[in-house]
Amino acid sequence: MTTVSLIDTLGRPLRDLRISVTDRCNFRCVYCMPKEVFGRDYPFLKREELLTFEEIHRLARILAEYGVQKVRLTGGEPLVRRDVERLVEMLARIPGLDLTMTTNGALLASKARALKEAGLQRVTVSLDSLDNDVFMAMNDVDFPATRVLEGIAAATAAGLTPIKINMVVKRGINEDSILPMARYFRGTEYVLRFIEYMDVGSTNDWRLDDVVPAGEIVARINAEMPLEPIEPNYRGEVARRWRYRDGSGEIGIIASVTQPFCGDCTRARLSAEGKLYTCLFASQGYDLRRLLRDRTSDAEISAVIASLWQARADRYSELRTSETAGLPKIEMSYIGG
Ligand SMILES: C[S@@+](CC[C@H](N)C(=O)[O-])C[C@H]1O[C@@H](n2cnc3c(N)ncnc32)[C@H](O)[C@@H]1O
Ligand code: SF4
């Protein structure tokens, strides 16, 4: 397949696509979908509002022609979208794509094998603590960490590897889980990545005081298990890499708040209802679903996407101040991480 590179106003190419396949989730993580907001009456998208698998596949194919090399399925929780493995199978047929998924792991034990057979290459699993009580306080639906570990084991057995583990750290809630998590995953095939709690959306009541800065996370681990920084794997890698000095593996830190990485951001995001966003912190997306359902040709959709990317100037995290944190933004559960 011949590809054409799209470059934005800050010289950044389009390389990654995150596709949210649903805005629903079986968890109510306090930093993402707080129960008080995402309750029974919350206006989740209706079935007919969601892009169909055929529509998602069509957009992914068009975007692949612009140099997208990596597609990550996310949500909400991608595994609650019915038959998501059928979408995986369709996307896996697009040549040259690295196809991955971010999941909370709750349904992985039952789905891992089918996902692998459909062509999914790897998964990233979110796990905020090994302590069942702390983890339940984070997911707020009484889901034990032990069952996520079973999901990780099933994904490993199915070959959805290498697997990354994401831990969001929130001050006063799970900061005491940093060291137990580091100890548990050190020396294994899993790469643990710590994520600074971000001001995504406007429902999680984000405060800078709730962020445990990357520097502090590294310092705490380094005090017990000495670390040294290592080079990124590729341009645009969001996690900064640290290696244990004794050779027992590495960790990653995603420091969107204290060490922004907008300069290398090569990601576009597609919401479950077909809006294209050029930044996680954007307040508006471009409605591609309207074009898809208006019988617009591939060439016309392609031209729209090119003009959107070529006009892109987003660098929210670099500009973030206490004032910008209050601006309207889309929810993480809507656009995916
Ligand atoms: C929105 S979730 C979607 C996929 C899936 N439900 C999961 O939890 O892995 C993607 C990632 O975003 C992270 N996340 C959600 N809200 C966040 C926040 N406010 N700050 C930092 N990371 C967040 C989650 O922990 C997860 O690793
Ligand atoms: S972080 Fe993932 S699992 Fe938690 S509420 Fe958000 S979408 Fe659901």
Image (tube, rainbow, N blue to C red):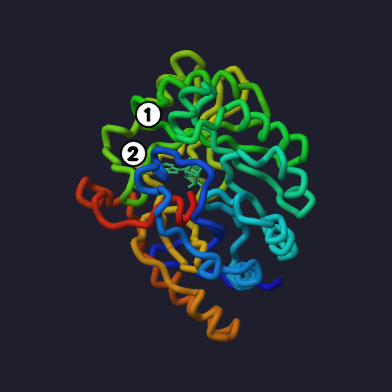
Choose the circle earlier in sequence order: 2 or 1: 1
Q: Are marks 2 and 1 in contact (CB under 8 Å)?
A: yes
The x, y position of residue 59, in whole percent, is: 59, 71
**In the image, the residue with mark 2 has its CB under 8 Å from the nearest atom of ligand 1:** no
Answer few, some or many: residues within 10 Å of disc 2's Cα (few below 14, many 20 plus, some between 14 and 19). Answer: some
User: Of helix, strand and loop, which one carries label 1?
Assistant: helix
From the viewer's perspective, is 189 left or right of 203? right
Depicted 7 relative to depicted 248: above or below: below
In the picture, residue 183 is in which quadrant? top right
Tell me the amino acid under the disc marked 2.
Answer: Thr
Q: Residues within 10 Å of mark 1 (few under 14, many from 20)?
A: few
Which residue lies most toward the top here? 224
Relative placement, left or right, of 198 versus 56 is left
Using the numbered discs, state the Cα–Cα distance from disc 2 to disc 1 in whole angstroms.
9 Å
Residue 102 screen position, x and y as percent: 58, 46
Report which residue position mark 2 lands on.
Answer: 258
Does residue 276 sit above or below 35 in this rendering?
Answer: below
Q: Is residue 13 visible?
A: no
